[in-house]
Amino acid sequence: MRKILKTTLTLLILSLFITTYAAANQPEQQTQTDLAIWTFPSTASDRLIADTGVLSNQLRLSAEGNRGGSSSNQPTFGTGANAGQLFINGWDSPNLSDKYWLIQSTSPVDYALNQHDVLEISFSAHSSNTGPRNFALEVNINNTWINAANYSLTSTTQDFIFQLPNEVKQTEYLQIRFRAIGNAAINGGIIQPAGTSRLFNIALTGIATSPQMEDIAQWQFTSLALFNNNTATATGGSQLTSTFGLAGGGNLTMGAGSAAGQLFVNGWGSATELTDSQYWHISTQTIGYSNIQISFGAHGSNTGPRNFIMEVNIGDGWIPVAHYMLTAGVQTFNFSLPTFASNASALDIRLRPGNNTAINGNAIQPAGTSRMYNIVIQGVPVLSSNAFTYTQVVEQDTQYAAVLIATDLQDATDSNLTLTYNPAMVEITSIQALTNAGINIISHEDGVLVFAFNNSDTDVLKIIVSFTAKTDGTAIFVFE
């Protein structure tokens, strides 16, 4: 019996190439993922692989059943006003119940489906006057077809969207069908051999509801009395021991009037020299949070520094993650930090001048000021769970590394971890511990890797899983 690891798990995906992260807005309450989309851009056939989407290489659309007395009767594409639509006839009796459009996966996809709160299928459809009118949308759960919805077509285009039963998320192989029910045609008569059903703009969508961002630490400056040795603790957020300050010296002053609440610092350099050791510095921790973001207001005087570099450090050295430029007018910046900033027991952020260029384009002068205000660090609370799922957009033949960080380890000796992934998308090349812990691969087949480790004296475990993407798309990993 596998022992459950009582700990906090965070899966981090790091490209082996350094990436600069652009400014980003806070995430929406709901996140929609295109799992599969068919737009029929190529020659019609009876086996149409989805064009785009996370599962595009694993889902196909087909026309099933004996068509018009000939099993070789193939779908065709509409032309003119019907371009991009898939047509098929032969819906007349006998054996109408065996005739349907079918979406099915060619490999297990439950690893991707069960990470979404809701699954939706949307499509456009209509029929010719002598084509089928009434359809049932059905899903196959445990080898039994279950009705999800009934709908009726007309001779003009209609758009449909239906929510699929939750049980679909647990099915290993996905099957969805659009089955004609009854022998009624659009015109009210009986379906005729030449009557066509037309299907297009098909999309399978996953919807995940994300919790609201929470403040980890924020600073609102009201007085220099907040500072001790050029450092102030947080004035809000869940981590009130977090600090913001100035490293490397400089003169702190507070703005007044329209600049009230702004922190001014000069002494950033001279016409011939820039002090590299002088920078704004934030120290905090993000245990229990993912999707870390930082926002702040900043500008400067004309002779103050213009070009800044944001760097982060979780104990392994400073890593540049963003570049930004100041002007003499008020600006607000929002940046998403790299994934490894999530669930960090220690996170340091510094904002330092990248060169000796001032806002006016000349060299920085000693009296030139940089100004900071309204500083907020936020994250999404990570819900306690025995499993952690992470997705990463990947490019074919590119190498990546998935880093697992386990914190607050309890009774972890000889525990097992399971890594589940799609072997058609990902090839794992190595797995190793970054901290003092031994790893033993117990089994590795069919996209499931089970390994055991021996706990060290530390309560933080780091494991790196290196892999190569076999195709373009989204790699999905589940650790539990």
Image: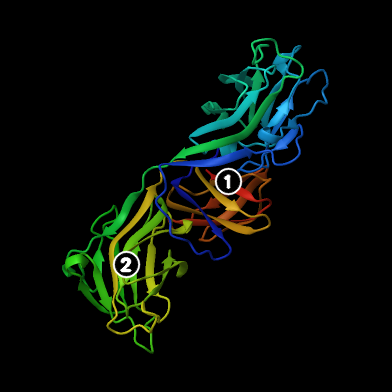
Vertical order, 404 against 356 (above or below): above
Which residue is label 1 attached to?
476
Question: Would you say 149 lies left or right of 271 here?
Answer: right
Vertical order, 363 against 14 (above or below): below
Disc ID at residue 292: none
Question: Would you say 275 lies left or right of 421 here?
Answer: left
Question: Would you say 342 lies left or right of 196 here?
Answer: left
The residue lying furthest to the bottom in this view is 272
- Residue 350 quadrant: bottom left
Question: Would you say 254 lies left or right of 105 here?
Answer: left
**Most foreground residue, 62 or 83:** 83
Q: Residues within 10 Å of mark 2 (few under 14, many from 20)?
A: many
**Most foreground residue, 269 or 477:** 269
Name the residue located 39 percent from the left edge and 51 percent from the top edge: 26
Secondary structure beneath dot 1 equals strand
Which residue is label 2 attached to?
298
Residue 138 visible (yes or no): yes
Give x and y (percent) for residue 3. Answer: 51, 41
Name the residue located 63 percent from the left edge and 22 percent from the top edge: 155
Q: Residues within 10 Å of mark 1 (few under 14, many from 20)?
A: some
Name the residue located 58 percent from the left edge and 51 percent from the top edge: 393
**Quadrant where the image shows the N terminus:** top right
Vertical order, 104 against 388 (above or below): above
- Residue 235 quadrant: bottom left
Name the residue located 68 percent from the left edge and 57 percent from the top edge: 397
